[in-house]
């Protein structure tokens, strides 16, 4: 363990803000695992979300061509600017990652219109899913994401136990996920009430299915609208059609109407989509 985060907070008279889900990493071994998983090279542009005090940022700038640190907290953004703003390969953006133009920022920093970048971040738990979806669905997607999230979210991402959800289907459409390591609460200050995990997602050049993503997720969300019910009933509920019509569509897709949404693979959801929309 190292006390850099604790001492910096004390020196600056700051406290972690619960409302922003702030838990600062204090375990150097965990930090090293995230850096290793990112496999950074001297030509890499890295986007870091929620850099906090800049402990991870300091490690990223050692190797990466450029680091874009996006911090929504004005106090922490000012501290980052004071501590690291003088470095030539650091750009600090004080903004909400869910609302900014990611492609515009990456291109302005990298000097390229089609820069391949990586995301490396210890994500605030309460927006972790939204941030991951933001990058998955971005016009300019990263080549790899290495993110710290709540353990439960990590298990949802990789469909642990064979149970899929909207998040795991979303990730599987755009990339290949894996859990790098699980992390105990004692690795953070202040310690969260749950275990965490480092997740790596290697993004595909093209989505795994040739679908209209808006219509595809309309079908998936419909299927999970009442996840405890049989698929014909949940699909009927979500698409506002009769159970018999839903059953006909599922049979057309080669899917038993009695199954539940969590048992379907990405490829099977593709078949349901084809049955509902005819591939258009």
Image (spheres, rainbow, N blue to C red):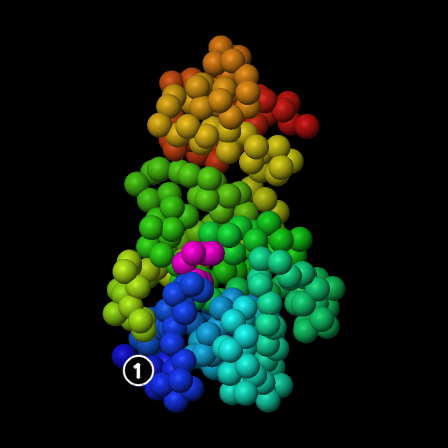
Identify the residue under disc 1.
Answer: 2
Quarter of image, res 279 = top right
Q: Nearer the viewer, residue 126 or 272?
A: 126
Q: Quadrant of the C terminus?
A: top right
Region of the chain picked out in magenta, as a range = 123-128
Position of 139 relative to 279 (above/below): below
| Percent position of residue 277, x then y | 63, 24
Observer able to see residue 207: yes
Position of 158 relative to 54 (above/below): above
Magenta highlight on residue 216: no
| Percent position of residue 62, x then y | 50, 83
Observer able to see residue 66: no
| Percent position of residue 23, x then y | 37, 69
Q: Main secondary structure of the magenta part?
A: helix
Badge 1 crowding class, 10 Å Cα cut-off, few under 14, some 14 to 19, many 20 or more, is few
| Percent position of residue 165, x then y | 42, 39
In this view, the residue farthest toward the top is 244
Position of 174 relative to 40 (above/below): above
Q: Nearer the viewer, residue 40 or 24?
A: 24
Q: Nearer the viewer, residue 164 or 266?
A: 164
């Amino acid at each position: 363990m190292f006390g850099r985060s604790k001492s910096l907070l004390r020196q600056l008279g700051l406290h972690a803000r619960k409302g922003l889900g702030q838990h600062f990493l204090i375990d150097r071994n965990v930090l090293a695992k995230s850096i290793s998983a990112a496999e950074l090279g001297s030509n890499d542009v890295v986007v870091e979300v929620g850099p906090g005090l800049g402990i991870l940022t300091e490690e990223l700038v050692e190797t990466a061509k450029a680091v874009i640190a996006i911090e929504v907290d004005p106090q922490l953004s000012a501290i980052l600017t004071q501590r690291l703003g003088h470095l030539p390969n650091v750009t600090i953006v004080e903004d909400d990652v869910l609302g900014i133009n990611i492609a515009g920022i990456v291109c302005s920093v990298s000097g390229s219109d089609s820069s391949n970048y990586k995301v490396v971040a210890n994500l605030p738990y309460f927006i972790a899913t939204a941030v991951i979806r933001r990058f998955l669905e971005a016009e300019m997607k990263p080549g790899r994401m290495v993110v710290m999230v709540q353990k439960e979210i990590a298990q949802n991402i990789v469909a642990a136990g064979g149970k899929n959800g909207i998040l795991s289907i979303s990730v599987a459409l755009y990339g290949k996920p894996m859990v790098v390591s699980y992390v105990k609460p004692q690795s953070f200050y202040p310690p969260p009430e749950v275990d965490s995990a480092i997740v790596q997602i290697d993004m595909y050049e093209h989505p795994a299915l040739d679908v209209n993503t808006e219509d595809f997720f309309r079908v998936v969300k419909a299927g999970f609208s009442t996840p405890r019910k049989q698929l014909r009933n949940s699909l009927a509920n979500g698409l506002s059609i009769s159970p018999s019509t839903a059953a006909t569509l599922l049979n057309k897709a080669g899917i038993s109407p009695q199954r539940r949404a969590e048992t379907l693979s990405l490829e099977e959801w593709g078949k349901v989509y084809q049955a509902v929309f005819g591939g258009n």
